């Protein structure tokens, strides 16, 4: 039987608690791309520069990265359900406050609080879905990536529809949707057993002492710089109305979802995860170079096309982070995310700065270089990654015949 088909079948047969968590995850991921179509509108409305408005991403992901050290500490003491609800409560409060901002400084500060809530929710949601989903870890990861892709696709669309009336409305809309998610999780998710051992603040950092996990995190760091250059800087390059920009990033998100859930697993089965990851990173580098140097039509096409490569990369990196080391999954995920989210914070800040120092093309050259560096880490550290992640290799590449989706 095709292992993907087995995963795809079981992905639809899930308890209500899993669907409630996945649904709230969709909204959480919507919050990442929500501001994309309205970045120029926010800059105009608050009389801010592109580099100032890009701090909306920087503050969000900087706090998210640091908070990764806290998520396991909190969830291992109060439980997964309470941690999810705490994270959702933070998002509801700070997303609502963001819509009331009068200055870009206030908005950046509220986005930081939003990032804290999102970190508590997203990292715990992955562990909850993996622990509660039917069909094993493969189905759980596919479900999580489906939520990510759907959220990434719908976020810009919601931002465009609500942002066309006012840049404030998408923030109020997110607060409302996350409040609905809060109620669903409160109603349907039972408290999961707490781990036998409480997680310390330094456990995620210690987990990075594992060569395979550290290699995956460093490679993902470079990749995320490229990813968030596309996400945070491209809207200023396209310079389109909220509706048109929202349509572009909706198409981008659809490709991200399709390739992360449908295409990536089949490619992994056929070629092996590390070959797929390395090739996809190189193709992403080429894509962002054309995006930076092509005309407006080429920039639109390459922005949408980048969603395909990003979707493939997201799936493979998630599997590597969860399976490459012997650390508990929540701890491994926290350590991995602690490293990679720093790049998500750096790219939105440095891309417009690099443009100010040079020209509009160079930020994309830097993004292409970081994608290649991510591929280089995969190639150089292949032995460490392959030795510990044999289950991610194709059937014909393993001695024991374990499939790409074996638990």
Image (spheres, helix red, strand yellow):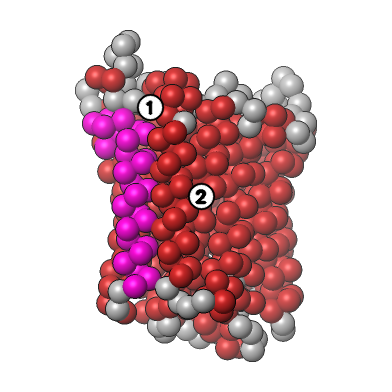
Q: Is residue 321 visible?
A: yes
Image height of 331 relative to 47, above or below:
above
The residue positioned farthest toward the front in the image shown: 358
- The answer to if 60 sits in the magenta stretch is no
Q: Name the residue located 31 percent from the left edge and 67 percent from the top edge.
A: 290
The quarter of the displayed image where residue 131 is located: top right
Mark 1 vs mark 2, CA separation in Å: 21 Å
Helix, strand or loop at label 2? It is helix
Residue located 31% across and 79% down the image: 296
**Which tag is nearer the camera, tag 1 or tag 2?**
2
Circle 1: is it few (<14), some (14-19), or many (20+) Cα within 10 Å?
A: many
Residue 222's disc is 2
Taking the magenta stretch, the answer to whether it contains residue 278 is yes
Quadrant occupied by the N terminus? top left
Mainly helix, strand or loop, the magenta region?
Answer: helix
Q: Residue at x 58, y 88 (%)?
A: 44
Examine the rendering and report whether any part of residue 180 can be seen: no
In the image shown, does 281 or 305 lie closer to the viewer?
A: 281
Helix, strand or loop under label 1: helix
For residue 333, the mark is: none
Q: Position of residue 235 (x, y in %)?
A: 45, 75
Which residue does the numbered mark 1 point to in the structure image?
Answer: 392
Foreground pick, 243 / 231: 231
Q: Position of residue 173 (x, y in %)?
A: 56, 70
Residue 359, percent from left and from top: 48, 78
Dividing the picture into quarters, in which one does residue 14 lie? top left
Query: What is the quadrant of residue 123 in the picture?
Result: top right
Specify whether 395 is left or right of 88.
Answer: left
* Number of residues whose C-alpha sits closer than 10 Å to that of mark 2, classed few (under 14), some (14–19) or many (20 or more): many
Q: Nearer the viewer, residue 376 or 240?
A: 376
- Front-lying residue, 343 or 373: 373
**Residues rendered magenta in the picture:** 267-293
């Amino acid at each position: 039987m095709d292992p993907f088909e087995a995963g795809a079948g079981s992905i639809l047969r899930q308890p209500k608690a899993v669907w409630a968590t996945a649904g709230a995850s969709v909204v959480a991921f919507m919050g990442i791309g929500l501001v994309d179509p309205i970045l120029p509108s926010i800059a105009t409305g608050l009389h801010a520069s592109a580099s100032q408005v890009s701090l909306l991403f920087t503050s969000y992901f900087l706090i998210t990265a640091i908070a990764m050290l806290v998520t396991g500490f909190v969830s291992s003491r109060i439980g997964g359900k309470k941690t999810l609800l705490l994270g959702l409560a933070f998002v509801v409060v700070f997303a609502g406050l963001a819509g009331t901002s009068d200055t870009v400084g206030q908005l950046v500060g509220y986005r930081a609080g939003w990032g804290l809530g999102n970190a508590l929710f997203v990292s715990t949601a992955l562990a909850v879905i993996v622990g509660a989903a039917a069909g094993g870890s493969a189905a759980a990861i596919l479900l999580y990536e489906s939520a990510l892709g759907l959220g990434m696709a719908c976020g810009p669309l919601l931002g465009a529809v609500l942002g066309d009336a006012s840049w404030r409305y998408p923030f109020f809309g997110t607060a409302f949707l996350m409040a609905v998610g809060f109620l669903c999780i409160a109603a349907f998710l039972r408290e999961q057993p707490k781990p036998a051992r409480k997680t310390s603040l330094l456990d995620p950092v210690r987990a990075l002492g594992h060569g395979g996990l550290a290699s995956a995190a460093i490679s993902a760091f470079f990749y995320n710089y490229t990813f968030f250059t596309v996400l945070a800087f491209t809207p200023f390059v396209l310079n389109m109305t909220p509706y048109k920009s929202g349509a572009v990033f909706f198409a981008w998100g659809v490709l991200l979802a399709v390739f992360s859930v449908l295409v990536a697993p089949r490619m992994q089965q056929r070629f092996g995860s590390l070959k797929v990851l390395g090739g996809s990173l190189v193709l992403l580098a080429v894509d962002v170079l054309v995006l930076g140097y092509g005309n407006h039509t080429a920039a639109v096409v390459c922005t949408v096309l980048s969603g395909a490569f990003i979707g493939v990369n997201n799936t493979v990196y998630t599997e590597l982070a969860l399976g490459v080391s012997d650390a508990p999954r929540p701890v491994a995920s926290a350590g991995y995310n602690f490293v990679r989210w720093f790049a998500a914070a750096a790219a939105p800040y440095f891309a417009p700065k690099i443009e100010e120092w040079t020209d509009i093309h160079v930020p994309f050259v830097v993004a292409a270089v970081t994608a290649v560096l991510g591929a280089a880490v995969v190639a150089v550290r292949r032995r460490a990654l392959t030795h510990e992640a044999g289950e991610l290799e194709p059937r014909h590449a393993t001695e024991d015949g374990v499939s790409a989706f074996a638990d």
